[in-house]
Amino acid sequence: MSATQPQVVDFELSPELAAFRSSVRDYANTHLGKAAEWDAEVKFPRSAVEAAAKLGLLRTTVSKAHGGSEMGNLASCIMLEEINAVCPSTGVTISVHNSLVNSLVGKWCSEEQKKRYFPKLVNGEWLGAYCLSEAFSGSDAAALRCEAKREGDHYVMNGAKLWITTGSEAKLFLVFARTGSDRVKGISAFLVEKDYPGVGVGKKERKLGLRGSPTNEIVLENVKVPAHNRIGDEGVGFTIALDTLDGGRLGIASQSLGIARACIELIRDCLGKQVDAKGRPTASQPDQWTLADLASELDAYRMLTWRAAILRDRGLRCGAEAAMAKSTASRLANRAARAAVAILGQEGASGATSAERWLRDARITEIYEGATDIQRLVIARSLLVP
Amino acid sequence: MSATQPQVVDFELSPELAAFRSSVRDYANTHLGKAAEWDAEVKFPRSAVEAAAKLGLLRTTVSKAHGGSEMGNLASCIMLEEINAVCPSTGVTISVHNSLVNSLVGKWCSEEQKKRYFPKLVNGEWLGAYCLSEAFSGSDAAALRCEAKREGDHYVMNGAKLWITTGSEAKLFLVFARTGSDRVKGISAFLVEKDYPGVGVGKKERKLGLRGSPTNEIVLENVKVPAHNRIGDEGVGFTIALDTLDGGRLGIASQSLGIARACIELIRDCLGKQVDAKGRPTASQPDQWTLADLASELDAYRMLTWRAAILRDRGLRCGAEAAMAKSTASRLANRAARAAVAILGQEGASGATSAERWLRDARITEIYEGATDIQRLVIARSLLVP
Amino acid sequence: MHNLQFTDDQTLILDTVAKFVADAVAPHAQERDEHRTFARDEFAGLAELGLFAMPIAEDRGGAGMGLLPFAASCEEIGARSGSLARLLVGQVQCATALAHAGSDAMGDVAAGGKLAAWIGREHGIALRGSSLSGKAELVPGAGEADLLVVAANDGGKTVLVIVEASATKRTALRALGFQSAAPARVEFGSSACVVAAEGSTAEAAVRAAETVAFLGSAAACVGAGRASIVAARAHASERIAFGKPLLGQQAVVRKLVECQRAVDAARHLVFHAARLADLGELAEAASMQARIAAVDAAVLAADEAIQIHGGFGYTVEYHVERHYRDAKATEVLDGGNERCKDRLAALQFGA
Amino acid sequence: MHNLQFTDDQTLILDTVAKFVADAVAPHAQERDEHRTFARDEFAGLAELGLFAMPIAEDRGGAGMGLLPFAASCEEIGARSGSLARLLVGQVQCATALAHAGSDAMGDVAAGGKLAAWIGREHGIALRGSSLSGKAELVPGAGEADLLVVAANDGGKTVLVIVEASATKRTALRALGFQSAAPARVEFGSSACVVAAEGSTAEAAVRAAETVAFLGSAAACVGAGRASIVAARAHASERIAFGKPLLGQQAVVRKLVECQRAVDAARHLVFHAARLADLGELAEAASMQARIAAVDAAVLAADEAIQIHGGFGYTVEYHVERHYRDAKATEVLDGGNERCKDRLAALQFGA
């Protein structure tokens, strides 16, 4: 993507991106119809992820040289909004695979590492997982304790990672571990295959929502990780983690937009049925006003998201912009879901409509890949520290 | 402005618009320094408006053929944000002149009418005022009662208009009056010169804020208005009024953005002073988070505003988009002003800083040119009525 | 509780309820909710404590203690189990309405021998001849109820009707909340029923039952809000981030302060409405106002508690997600907060 | 008032205050505010009613009626004039502190013979030797005050100090609010002063004065919120738009319902805190909570009232813009709402 080629002209998508969006919308309508079932039965949406792989949706952030479609972050955002507007469990699986795993590998791994892993990642043969959080380090990621001790040509890794999205399904783990004592500069990043001896999938979380997406503990017991699977130099792990999260946040911002949109559509459909003989809306004014406010904010925060994606596609810094996108969109998703339940009333809470699922799924967007207060911290710092 | 020429590429301004913005910023810094004084003394910022006229800021929405700079709505929005970030009393004067008066004349008046009035309007020799509201018709504009009775080659106009911005300073009034009994189709628009016998400037409102901008009653007593000063056909007045308000709302959205930005800058400066020895912010977290949220929304709603302006510049409908821009930006301006007073504390409320003026000036943005609930109605209708 | 005004008798009751809740409700609340098992033992416990008869007037066969200790009990129970609090509310609604109607069925309901579920006017169930028709989408307790007490519509007038639950079609729901209260969809396919009251008696009975629901659900939400704050504070005290407990982060504790204010204010509104009702004054507006405030406070507190818990809050083990769901589900019951606001518009502003 | 609990004595006082406010305060409030004229006659009226001495303990020379009727009086006055309510608050703060200190100056202040303005700890005025230094940015009443009572900082400890106002430099302010209360900036250029209390006496005196300010300004805000709602309802009943009164627009009346709830909840918090204080319990947290809730409610109600008034609300003639300004100005006084929240964090959550 060249730095001068405009991707979004006058707030409108290029014909190519508009066509891509339309094709993803078709995919979502065709393959994600079981979202409610996956939720109720706590079932991984395997068929949906396989279909996404076939359509090339697991390689949007990978360069053509490595088998990707090189569509970049903006295209990924557009794609993720569509998928998440139907099934956020599928959405987060694809978001993590693309926005965190593939993006990191493409940007930070050696050519040799890319050649080893991209062939399996771009076609979905392997799904990836991003292993940063631990039981005692969530928002404060630099407090991680998982350890990687250099021994000859390999590292011996010990520790446990918590809240790992796609944990039980992934074949490749990007693991951040401590190679030194310095809080920040003691952290390094590694490519860890699921089949390495000592890698175990631990406890599966029982969650409020996103129940189709498995969230696991990943236990690392004396895992021998070849030194050539270290990503970059020792000590740059935290830099890699934060940079990657900027892209991940765009994925979650897009997920939030998708959820918000789905809720707004539920409300619109509900209110749209209430008309007089001349077709004029008769729904309660406060409900109509709620719809208007949510729709305005959806458009606004989508632009924040796209702006950050374009910056990232150009290789520019987008930390504060991505934080603005995620913090605003995720809060909107939750407000929209709460409004949908309230406005749909008993149909909203009984399970007769998807409103209650949106409420449950939406709640995580304010928590993972940097809780809202962390986003605010990033934004405030960018304004206060010149 | 051609329909294919991109004005905003990738959410960034063209070099031309960026340069224009910078020149307006210079104007604002040079000529609007007495904003506090104009407020305290309830004084029209004459010098500021004259300087704006000299710089060509009163003709941005006028075609080159009629002496304008033909910069369009987007440029006007950019200009108005800069001016309003220093002095909203000057800002609203220029906004009404450009976004309501000049825009209406350019779009709806005959060539002959344009030739008569634009020469005086584009150089600020005459300021314009938009006379729609009445004592008994605010949000419900179609309830207006001011009457224009055809008598031969002229109309006899009787009634009173309320809340007329620039009322005591304007030389040309765009007056909406009743030429028939039909609620909507009985309304027509007229060009009324201040010097016509029977035109009187009535009561001056004593207001919470925007005290540099005179708001008056305009009394029309047996005013003979030549028939050739009717704008368009009889009965299209309401259509003209609403269409013009779409543009006007972009002006007020931009005013709101300017006010919000000024408040955010006040907060940033206040918090920015609170640092530890290493220059790290020590301001209270809740205040920092407030700053982060306000800054995120400012960026988001500016994009909503620009999007609507671009649509309008292309001759496309932008009613819902303009309503989204105005309703979100005006509420943000008020939230930002309230936050500024709270965070600046006694310095915020005592008059020692401009925070208390922003609070007072901001409040009108949710009221005039269509109160927030009217914007919500427009947005909801656009979503509910296909 | 910052209340200043419970009598000694009331305090005694509340202590007993608090002990029951701690011993018998709290230990199983999460598990029952997760597996959607009906809280039958807990329901029996409420019966044993006499809570169903507590607010019913003595001359109508109740204990005549009024709504204030009922509300305070709902708060205690709601702090641990929104489902059980809702069962209590429904049972007391039914008992109250039947007591107003002078129905023989009241005794069994007030004693808890029969489990009763209330189906309010908002469902628009129609009485035609001697049978009911219509559908109630979300009725806590209905899945396990023996009796349904229905505020039915008889050609525009409200009638109070009793139906054997087995005469209706009930579908267990995977609803947002109340998962251990057997929430069900109830369909009346011309179900045979008994009219317990008509005319002004029915109207008074139904209004009394509505006030019970507004107050009871408000109080349960106050409890849920309180519990969310307690849980969040406990987690924030233990959890270390950036070198100090979360509780030391100004942004975190500020949220707790704001939640506490909302919950305390809601409690004042609840107790005030209960006192008004117990003095025999009209408490409809006050109880609806309390309900709206309490639902909002509970949603706010649970939402912030989830956020303070971070990823932990998103799991079922920390209870706060359950309070969040139950509070949101409470919002849509009893006609929903929106209907309350419309009625308040009429009562308070004549609109 | 929905309070249920005023004594007959209290009701009598409140009726008298209400009559005074209607007759002597309401007719001039707007005009005085617009022209920034000091409400001297009204201040004298408060003195005549004995309001300054009302909450002071009898054994300290006051009327010993407690803070509950004081708060209720502040509400009545605040409904018409935020400026006058603030003068009352300041005078009672000074009287309360001086009473604690056993100062001779108390008599004149409690009787209203001398106008006193309170300068709290938040201003950080320093006592050095026998003179004060520092600046208080925004002090209602100071422009016309005879005495300033200062909670000054003496090497880290609080001391209570009395200064002749004429010994300081006072600059009249064009402030956001309190325009008929002579708000001024006060600069202490080594102003000579008298120390009225030190040590634990000073600490207790200042704390008591702070509680008076929290409660009094909260109550005044409840009044302003109430008045905004009344004004908005009146306007909405008369104003026709789209063929019916604004009050018939669901979106309009819904706002009133929400404002009413906020104001009612705040009043409950205020009265509760006042009762706690009158029972001799610690009321610091309760009064700060009330203050935050009441300021928020007043800002909300005034803001919505302006919006419901449309363009009329933006003019000075409809009073609601004045309530908006006074409520926001109240927010920054007494250390500001933010300081209250930080203290609440410590008191309620040990943070």
Image: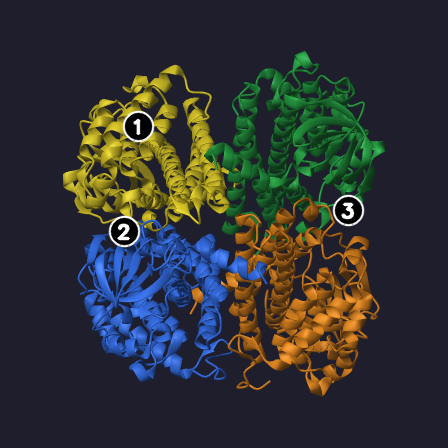
Chain colours: A orange, B blue, C green, D yellow
CB-based contact (under 8 Å), mark 1 and mark 3: no
Query: Eyeballing the image, is A153 above or below B330?
Result: below
Q: Which of marks 1 and 3 is in front?
A: 3
Can you give x and y, in whole percent of width and height, for residue D271 in the image?
Answer: 43, 28
Q: Quadrant of the N terminus of chain D?
A: top left
User: What chain does mark 3 sit on?
Assistant: C
Query: Is B270 left or right of C109, judged from the image as shown?
Result: left
Identified by mark 3, the residue type is Arg
For this rendering, which residue is in front, D3 or A208? Answer: D3
**What kind of element bears circle 2?**
loop
The residue to which callout 3 is attached is C174
Q: Tell me what residue is drawn at x 71 percent, y 43 percent.
A: C177
The residue to which callout 2 is attached is B207
User: What chain does mark 2 sit on?
Assistant: B
Q: How far apart are marks 1 and 3 (CA)?
A: 60 Å
For this rendering, which residue is in front, A267 or B65? Answer: B65
In the drawing, what numbered circle is on residue B295?
A: none
**What kind of element bears circle 1?**
helix
Query: Is D24 left or right of B62, judged from the image as shown?
Result: left
Can you give x and y, in whole percent of width and height, for residue D80 in the image?
Answer: 30, 35
Q: Distance between the residues labelled 1 and 2?
A: 38 Å
Query: Eyeballing the image, is C36 above or below D68?
Result: below
For this rendering, which residue is in front, A289 or C41? Answer: A289
For this rendering, which residue is in front, C105 or D279? Answer: C105
Can you give x and y, in whole percent of width and height, for residue B69 in the image?
Answer: 32, 81
Q: Residue furthest front?
A: B152
The residue to which callout 1 is attached is D96
